[in-house]
């Protein structure tokens, strides 16, 4: 009987996680930003309202992003995950 409750609890947690991670709960943001920090795993950007956001980036693009330069970025996030970069283009 105890095994049934454990298995049911684990199944419920997995289903809940998948449901929360589905695209229905993800949001996208696009903004003109200035990059204030670059590391191997993330960038810190500041929008026109001076709000800072830390965004996860894919491996290998850190050399292409320059601090104090303006970019148009698009990133997605959910309530349980941190922002993740979708696209980045230099502002012209």
Image: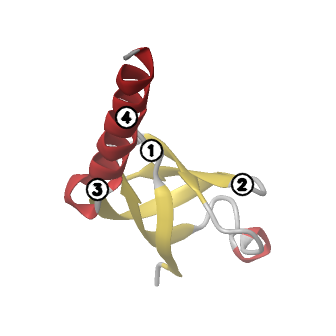
Residue at x-position 37% and y-position 26%:
4
Would residue 61 be found to the left or right of residue 25 on screen?
A: right
Looking at the image, do the residues carrying marks 1 and 2 touch, with CB atoms under 8 Å apart? no
Q: Which residue is mark 1?
A: 81
Can residue 79 be seen here? The reply is no
Residue at x-position 30% and y-position 40%:
16
Where disc 4 sits, the SS reads: helix
Would residue 32 be found to the left or right of residue 44 on screen?
A: left
- Spatial CA span between label 4 and label 2: 28 Å
Looking at the image, do the residues carrying marks 4 and 3 touch, with CB atoms under 8 Å apart? no
- Spatial CA span between label 3 and label 1: 9 Å
User: Which comes before the other along the chain, label 4 or label 3?
Assistant: 4
State whether residue 42 is above or below residue 13. Answer: below
Q: Quadrant of residue 10?
A: top left
- Spatial CA span between label 2 and label 3: 21 Å
- Spatial CA span between label 1 and label 2: 15 Å
Looking at the image, do the residues carrying marks 4 and 1 touch, with CB atoms under 8 Å apart? no
Residue found at the very far front of the displayed protein: 1
User: Which comes before the other along the chain, label 2 or label 3?
Assistant: 3
Badge 1: residue crowd in 10 Å (few <14, some 14–19, many ≥20): few
Query: Looking at the image, is mark 1 or mark 2 nearer the viewer?
Result: 1
Q: Which residue is mark 2?
A: 41
Looking at the picture, tell me which residue is in the foreground, 11 or 45. Answer: 11
Q: Quadrant of residue 76?
A: bottom left
User: Which comes before the other along the chain, label 4 or label 1?
Assistant: 4
Query: Residue 13 — which label?
Result: 4
Query: Looking at the image, is mark 4 or mark 2 nearer the viewer?
Result: 4
- Spatial CA span between label 4 and label 3: 19 Å
Measuring from the top left, give residue 20's x and y in whole percent.
Answer: 29, 46
């Amino acid at each position: 009987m105890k095994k049934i409750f454990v298995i049911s609890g684990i199944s419920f947690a997995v289903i809940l996680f998948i449901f929360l991670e589905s695209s229905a709960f993800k949001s996208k943001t696009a903004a003109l930003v200035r990059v204030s920090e670059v590391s191997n795993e993330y960038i810190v950007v500041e929008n026109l309202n001076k709000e800072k956001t830390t965004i996860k980036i894919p491996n290998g693009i850190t050399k292409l992003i320059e601090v104090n330069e303006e970019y148009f970025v698009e990133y997605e996030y959910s309530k349980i995950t941190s922002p993740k970069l979708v696209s980045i283009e230099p502002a012209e």
